[in-house]
Image (tube, rainbow, N blue to C red):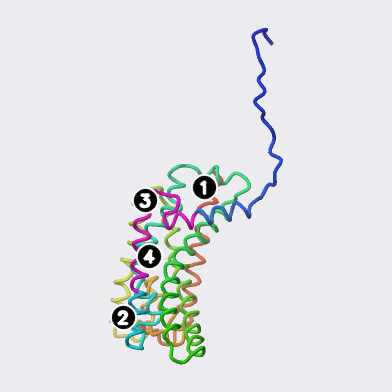
Amino acid sequence: MSESSVIHDIGYQRYTGPRLGRGAVFGALYVHGLRAAYGFDRSAKAKIFPWLVFGIVALVAVILAAARSLTGTLPMNYIQFADAMSWLIIFFTAIVAPELVSRDMKSGVLPLYFSRPLRSADYVGAKVAALASAVWILLAVPQFIIFLGGAFTTKTGMSGVWDEVLDLLPGWGYSLLWALVFTGIGLLIASLTGKRAFAAGGIVAVFLMTTPVVGVLSILPSSTAQDLAGLASPMTLVSGVGQWLISGANTGLNIGEFGPVYAIEAATLVATCLLLLLARYRKVASL
């Protein structure tokens, strides 16, 4: 060492605190994803679309609750409400899904994420949980507004409130089905490109291109083809499952005796999307 060399003590110390591990990283990624879905911790511009959609859905719920208080009847039940808001869910998913995964791909931070302790399966699970929660909240909160309108205007006391609860819970379950199907499709498409505009367009295109197929199949002379027509589109697929599982759903879709077929396809679709997402990010993690 030369005479001019100097050693500076900059006070570096090893970290001796608790190491929280995978669970804490998963939770932090989930919370961050859920907040990002609604524009929290982002610019005001990023908040406009998700809160505009949420505001529209909530406004419809308020109108339905007000109409019920005036007329004594609900223009549409909880299941029909979710169906009526389906197109808004599509556009919400098309904007939020690329925000959750395409940005990470474009910025090249995935190799940093997949260094320990986060694994690709944890990343996929956190993103799926975040988007599914965001979509479910988009429907569940307005449904709860409708519930409050019914609970406070019932004329049969606690029995009326309990009946309203029994109507709300299947509606929340139906909303969860919407969330899972849309999340699986949306994240899978968004994971294929780092360009958010392309990802959003691809998500919308999947639903736009499959919907006319249902219309074509539903006018065929075969009654079997008509009952199975809803299998051709994710939107009518969810409606078919709701029609079969929930008494009094009245989704307007004729499924005949093929309710189990709709349920099997819905479960297969969600599982396939999740498996393809895992395969996609395992490939990224191995690079």
Q: Give whichever of discs 2 and 1 has the lower sequence position.
A: 2
283 within the magenta span: no
Question: What's the distance in space between the residues labelled 3 and 2, CA to CA?
Answer: 44 Å
Residue 234, position as x, y percentages in the image: 40, 70
Q: Residue at x 35, y 88 (%)?
A: 73
Give, as a three-letter code, the residue at label 3: Ala
Question: What's the distance in space between the residues labelled 3 and 4, CA to CA?
Answer: 15 Å
Magenta residues span 33-60
* Horizontal side, residue 190 vs residue 11: left or right: left
Q: Is residue 162 above or below residue 238?
A: below
59 within the magenta span: yes
The disc label shown at residue 284, or none? 1
Give, as a three-letter code, the residue at label 1: Val
Q: Give whichever of discs 3 and 2 has the lower sequence position.
A: 3
Q: Give whichever of discs 1 and 3 has the lower sequence position.
A: 3
Q: Which residue is mark 2?
A: 218
The disc label shown at residue 54, or none? 4
Tag 3's secondary structure?
helix
